[in-house]
Amino acid sequence: MKTFLLLLTAAGLLMMPIPVRAQGWRGVVPLHSTRQEVERLLGSPKKSNGSFSSYETKTEEVRVFYSITSCETDKSAEWNVPLGTVIQFTVYPKQKLPLANLKLDNAKFQRQPDYHVQGVVYYFNRADGIVVDTRILEGNVEDVFGITYWARTADQPLRCPKPLQ
């Protein structure tokens, strides 16, 4: 019975709505978390090709980009982080997720319609490194298509220095 309750609780946690927090998603934080930490959380990737891996849970797909170069070995490298560090990732909910369910703080998120694709709207929080990608569907309801986590403003010192031209 105790094992059953533990499994039921774990399943419930996996089915919770996607939280949008400054400290990342489920403890995964761009430029700080590693491939090993992601795989400990999500298991083996369903697809992988070096810098990119795709993972699946019951409620979402997660696509992660990892560092594969460093400032010392590649002048075009963007971030001064160890190899295998999460650079950015996107969480795609499998079920319909109305934007209203995220309860975004309007003071922190800037709304920006896509000027090229009708019905697509982005919500940017540059300080916390979060972009919420929505689609306006029937009834003018915005549904979340994906939530991308990338470098926070506080992480800018981790950028590789660019050579003078």
Image (spheres, rainbow, N blue to C red):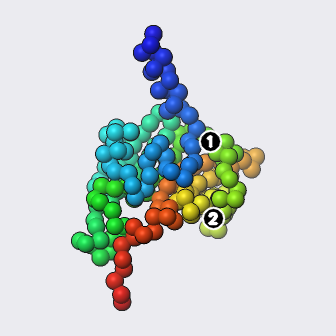
| Mark 2 residue element | loop
Q: Quadrant of the N terminus?
A: top left
Q: Position of residue 86 (x, y in %)?
A: 38, 55
Q: Is residue 139 left or right of residue 91?
A: right
Q: Which mark is residue 67?
A: none
The quarter of the image holding the C terminus is: bottom left
Q: Is residue 134 above or below residue 12?
A: below
Q: Label 1's element? A: loop
- Inspect the image, locate mark 1, and give the three-letter code of the amino acid beneath it: Leu
User: How many numbered circles does the render carry?
Assistant: 2
Residue toward you, 118 or 70: 70
Give me the C-alpha separation between circle 1 and circle 2: 20 Å
Res. 118 in view: no
Residue 114 image label: 2
- The residue carrying pointer 2 sits among few (fewer than 14), some (14 to 19) or many (20 or more) residues within 10 Å by Cα, namely few
Q: Is residue 41 above or below residue 149?
A: above
**Label 2 is placed on what type of residue?**
Asp
Instruction: Say which residue appears at 56% left-offset and 42% top-offset.
Output: 18
Sequence-earlier tag: 1 or 2 = 1
Q: Is residue 77 visible?
A: yes
Q: Pointer 1: what residue?
A: 97
Counting from the top left corner in percent of width and height, residue 143 is at: 64, 47
In the depicted structure, whether residue 103 falls above or below residue 120: above
112 vs 81, nearest the viewer:
81
